[in-house]
Image (cartoon, helix red, strand yellow):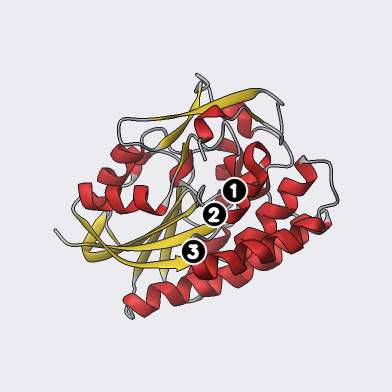
Amino acid sequence: MDYTKLIIKDEAFTKEKFGLKRDHNGVLMTHPRPTQLVPYYDFDDYISHRSEKTNVVTRIYNAVKHIMFSIKLKSIHNHKPQVESVLDYGCGTGEFVNFLNTRGIKAEGFEPTLSAFKKASRKNIKVYNSMNKIIKTYDVITMFHVLEHVEDYTKTLKFLKTRLNPNGLLLIAVPNHKSYDATFYKEKWAAWDVPRHLWHFSKTDIRNLVKKNYLELIQIKPLPFDAFYISMVSEAYKGNPKAFGIWRGLLSNLNAIKTKEYSSHLFVIKSII
């Protein structure tokens, strides 16, 4: 499907319309890019910057999020049993950082969005709001649904590589525009989330970026819960009951068993030089 022909609305907030085009690496990018992105995050319903349990979808999101904390930690330990330090890059309100600290891991966060940074800082955890302040190195750096938000993904990956200890791990989770739910919902696919998502990746895109940055991809892990949440929000964007998304999310995961194209993937990457 040629996604560059889609006209995608910011369904979550401003209702502005955007398109997609490919950059020099072939990665889909939101077009036009707003000159100021901060205002597009400044609304109460932006779920990753909110921890309060207010409605059914938010409750489901938060319940699954805490299940995923354990799954993510297990993914880390599967490849690196001894972990002393973690940086959660794009930590939102700092819940995963707090979770890791309670498990005896020295975790810190980075969050550039002021409202989320303030909420994270109130949790008595170490959080940076500027890349220039990150001078330490870490055993593991996590980016859970963050790479699609950064201004320059190449620059960000190069910087994070310098912040990894030898044989350190970088975990990146991103939506997959080649999934069944993406092709079904088309312009109503919630994971476009324009313009907050500046970039839209496929598995091939991430493989190419890993190779170009002299890193080693050691595992691609499906994130099947994402299909349900994304499909529920997508149904709402279509004007349907959110519950319809449960069936569509199931279909997406069943389809992915054959195609290996899940709604989102977690990429476990190793620093080799």
Helix or strand or loop: what does disc 1 sit on? helix
Q: Quadrant of the C terminus?
A: bottom left
Do we see residue 104 in this rendering?
A: no
Q: Name the residue under label 3.
A: 259
Q: In this view, does 15 lie to the left or right of 201?
A: right
Query: Is 228 situated above or below 46?
Result: below
Q: Distance between the residues labelled 3 and 2?
A: 9 Å
Q: Mark 1 points at which residue?
A: 182
Amino acid carrying mark 1 in the image:
Ala
Report if the CB atoms under discs 1 and 2 are less than 8 Å apart: yes
Give the x, y percent position of residue 35: 50, 18
Q: Which residue is drawn at 75% across and 57% down?
A: 245
Q: Say few, some or many: other residues with alpha carbon within 10 Å of mark 1 (under 14 / 14 to 19 / 20 or more).
A: many
Amino acid carrying mark 3 in the image:
Thr
Do we see residue 205 in this rendering?
A: yes
Amino acid carrying mark 2 in the image:
Ser
Q: Distance between the residues labelled 1 and 3?
A: 14 Å
- Viewer-nearest of labels 1 and 3? 3
- Viewer-nearest of labels 3 and 2? 3
Of 24 and 14, the residue lying toward us: 24
Q: Say few, some or many: other residues with alpha carbon within 10 Å of mark 2 (under 14 / 14 to 19 / 20 or more).
A: many
Report if the CB atoms under discs 3 and 2 are less than 8 Å apart: no
Q: Mark 2 points at which residue?
A: 179
Q: In this view, does 16 lie to the left or right of 113?
A: right
Helix or strand or loop: what does disc 3 sit on? helix
The image quadrant of residue 8 is top right
Give the x, y percent position of residue 102: 52, 73
